Amino acid sequence: MAESIRPGKLDATDFLQIDELLSGEERLMRNTVAQFVTDKVLPNVGDWFDEGFFPRDLVKEMGDMGLLGMHLTGYGCAGTSAVAYGLACTELEAGDSGVRSFVSVQGSLAMYPIWAFGSEEQKQRWLPGMAAGETIGCFGLTEPDSGSDPGSMRTTARRDGDDWVLKGTKMWITNGSIADVAIIWATTDNGVRGFIVPTDTPGFTANTIHKKMSLRISITSELVLDDVRVPSDAILPNVSGLKGPLSCLNEARFGILFGAVGAARACYEAALDYAKERIQFDRPIGSFQLTQRKLVEMMIGVNNGMLLALHLGRKRDEGTLAAEHVSYGKLVNVRMALETAREARGVLGANGITLEYPVIRHMNNLESVYTYEGTNEIHTLVLGQAITGLSAFS
């Protein structure tokens, strides 16, 4: 006769007891980053968001913790598992999407192309300083008229003797105005190529984009390249075509599909706490059926999102993760997080629009996360092609 089920203690946040699926090392990574966020991000993040201020002093601290390029090996990088990297992204984004965005751009968009496609000399020159947080990088792909279709970029690189001369404009570039080095993608006579461009090179200008209502603690910039001359060894030698930048974006999307769960969890926890404390009609609003329905839907979304992220992380560590799986995770989890944030805002009522609570900040940030690193629509079409074999892009 089968034994009766003996459930463990139910946790309102980790309802499915997903923590039991993690190794001790993974828990340690998660807890360490969570404590960093609690100590260094959460006490000030509302003010930073209000002021549009990026806390640069956090960069060196994150470097000291091994969070920059943490999923890469060698050259001062921590070489963690994909799951450990994902869990770190979850906790960073529970603090703010802008903090996780910095780590994603530094590690997956700026360091990864050097690590994957650069020469040994390029790796030795740039990666140790970037891993330590001493050198900040950015990634220049998107242009004013070239977003979802990077193949239409107008930035060019032409040979002039032994040098390359870059001309064009990049837009919506995270870290652009504070970066020491930029990975610039440009069209050449032999297709799209990547270039390592120090930002103090003559002709390189970064203009900060102001009046944003989303990702306000993240620096976003326009990059202008006015006949920027770089030596021949500035080109990334081991990749050509759109495979280069698209593989970098896939690296960043992996962090996003974990990170979005952190933002959703923060919103759910804020709504749950508020619903148990807010009294209306002589009762906590958490006792009302409609409020409980909202809380349950949020809880289900957060738990399902973490299960999905963990599953995809395990697949990546096993070497069985396809790019389409990452699109699935990014689409589903960001959509879930945005829906959770909006539902949580409703539970908090008017208090939900103030920065005394994290919800409106996460909700505004997630509007950007929904769009960048491939819009929701683009990932839908990627999955459509995967299941039909028919492309909607051409």
Image (cartoon, rainbow, N blue to C red):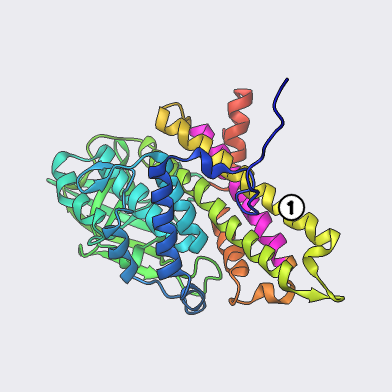
Q: Which residue is the site of mark 1? A: 296
Q: Secondary structure at mark 1?
A: helix
The percent position of residue 180, horizontal first and vertical second, equals: 25, 62
Mark 1: few/some/many CA within 10 Å (<14, 14-19, 20+): some
Instruction: Judge whether residue 317 is colored magenta.
Output: no
Q: Residue at x 59, y 46 (%)?
A: 333
**Magenta part, dominant SS:** helix
> Does 91 sit left or right of 197 as displayed?
right
- In the image, is 391 to the left or to the right of 44? right
Q: Between 43 and 254, which is closer to the camera in this rendering?
A: 43
Left or right of 78, for residue 82: right
212 in relation to 104, above or below: below
In the rendered view, tell whether residue 310 sits above or below residue 64: above
Per the rendered image, the range of residues in magenta is 323-345
Q: Residue furthest top?
A: 1
Q: Position of residue 38 (x, y in %)?
A: 45, 66
The C terminus, quarter of image: top right
The quadrant holding residue 81 is top left
Residue drawn at 65 percent across, 59 percent down: 268
> Is residue 329 something one can see in this rendering?
no
From the top left corner, tell me how far across and down residue 294 is, in percent.
76, 57
Q: Does the magenta-highlighted stretch encompass residue 329?
A: yes
Q: Judge whether residue 302 can be spotted in this image.
A: yes
Vertical position of residue 197 compared to residue 112: above or below: below
- Residue type at mark 1 is Val
**Camera-side residue of 193 and 339:** 339
x, y percentage for residue 72? 30, 42
Q: Quadrant of the N terminus?
A: top right
Q: Is residue 77 left or right of residue 55?
A: left
Closer to the camera in the image, 80 or 168: 80
Q: Residue at x 24, y 50 (%)?
A: 196
